Amino acid sequence: MKLILAVSGGVDSMALLAMYAHADIIVVHIDHGTRKSSAEDADFVHQKCQELGVKFYETKLELGEGVSEELARKKRYEFLKTIQEKEGGTLCTAHHLDDVLESITINLIRGTGWRGLTPFYGDELVRPFIISKMWKCDVLKFAGRHAIHYRQDPTNYETNYLRNRVREKMTELDETVRVDIIDLFEKQNKLREKIEKLVAELAKQTIVGKNFHKKELFLRADEKVAIEILREICLMHDYSLTRKQLEDFLTAIKTYAPHKKFNLPKNRFVTILKNYFEFKWTTILLWFSSEAAGTAVSWVVDAEPRFIHSIRID
């Protein structure tokens, strides 16, 4: 099985590279362009891949200093997916159990719901260190035993990043507490899988047409349950709404008079009917004329570009 390893040059990813050096691997390095020394990291990883005879991809994103962790992660995974589509194989990252603790803590600080207890859920990446139940200390021991050389990222010690502040506090946790949190993480992953399967089934039961859904379930279900089902329905229609948007949507379903519209992002809206609600797209009229040809052409087009309702030539 071909593996695509995300390798930054730090101790975690270099340990991952050493662990799979003799497997069928491709290495991908992303230079976020967030610090001046990042080009040296790319050269370091490239040189190691040349020594190992491993295929190497890199990109420089030029995100600039002070970029948010969320944006950097989004751009990083976009490039990884691009390489996966080109080469095939399984994407692997060097996350370990300490990363799980940090992510759960950050999610709770930011006020996420129960999904915040399941970081990395459903993203289709393989994390060998988490599967092997390895902590940061285990990765460091592995690196020491195998005399692995790696780069230090100075931004890991800057306190203006929330993750760095959380990481520092995590060192104060008792080992028993750390193990208990990971146990909760594993149980929550299993529970989330069951919940999402059930919610998906309930969402399907509301469907009465391509863009139509029955209101009945939302009028009688517990609000938290209704929100989860509504979230799933929105995902069916390629929408990922915030908690506040979902709450407003649910209120519209329950209280709007028939034929009143509830606006969604991307030029879409929902028409609330007596017993149903319907997802729609804003209609845009595009018109131009050609004096040379002596014609005027207009299109009535949905905001969703793949649909053209009518073409008229005058």
Image (cartoon, grey):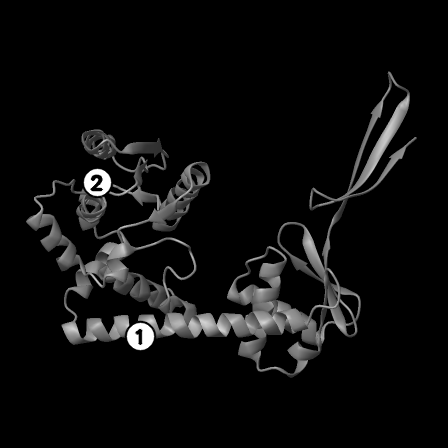
Q: Find the residue positioned furthest to the top.
A: 292
Image coordinates for residue 93, horizontal then vertical, percent: 30, 50
Q: Residue at x 69, y 42 (%)?
A: 305
Q: Gap between marks 2 and 1, in whole Å?
A: 31 Å
**Apparent side of residue 274 relative to residue 2 in the rendered image (left or right):** right
| Along the viewing direction, whichever of 33 and 31 lies nearer the viewer | 31
Q: Amino acid at mark 2?
A: Gly
Q: Quadrant of the C terminus?
A: top right
Q: Amino acid at mark 1?
A: Leu
Badge 2 marks a residue whose secondary structure is loop
The residue singled out by tag 1 in the image is 184
Check the image and report above or below for 82 versus 261.
above
Tag 2–tag 1 contact (CB < 8 Å): no
Image coordinates for residue 136, horizontal then vertical, percent: 17, 57
Marker disc for residue 162: none
| Along the viewing direction, whichever of 209 and 228 lies nearer the viewer | 209
Q: Quadrant of residue 250?
A: bottom right
Q: Residue at x 61, y 60 (%)?
A: 236
Check the image and report above or below for 150 versus 40.
below
Q: Residue at x 15, y 72 (%)?
A: 175
Check the image and report above or below for 65 versus 187.
above
Check the image and report above or below for 215 versus 234.
below
**Apparent side of residue 276 relative to residue 178 in the rendered image (left or right):** right
The residue singled out by tag 2 in the image is 9
**Apparent side of residue 63 relative to residue 143 in the rendered image (left or right):** right
| Along the viewing direction, whichever of 57 and 250 lies nearer the viewer | 57
On the question of residue 113 being in view, the answer is no
Q: Residue at x 30, y 32 (%)?
A: 55
**Disc nearer the start of the sequence (2/1):** 2
Badge 1 marks a residue whose secondary structure is helix
- How dense is the environment of label 2, judged by Cα within 10 Å: few (below 14), some, or many (20 and up)? many
Image coordinates for residue 10, horizontal then vertical, percent: 20, 44
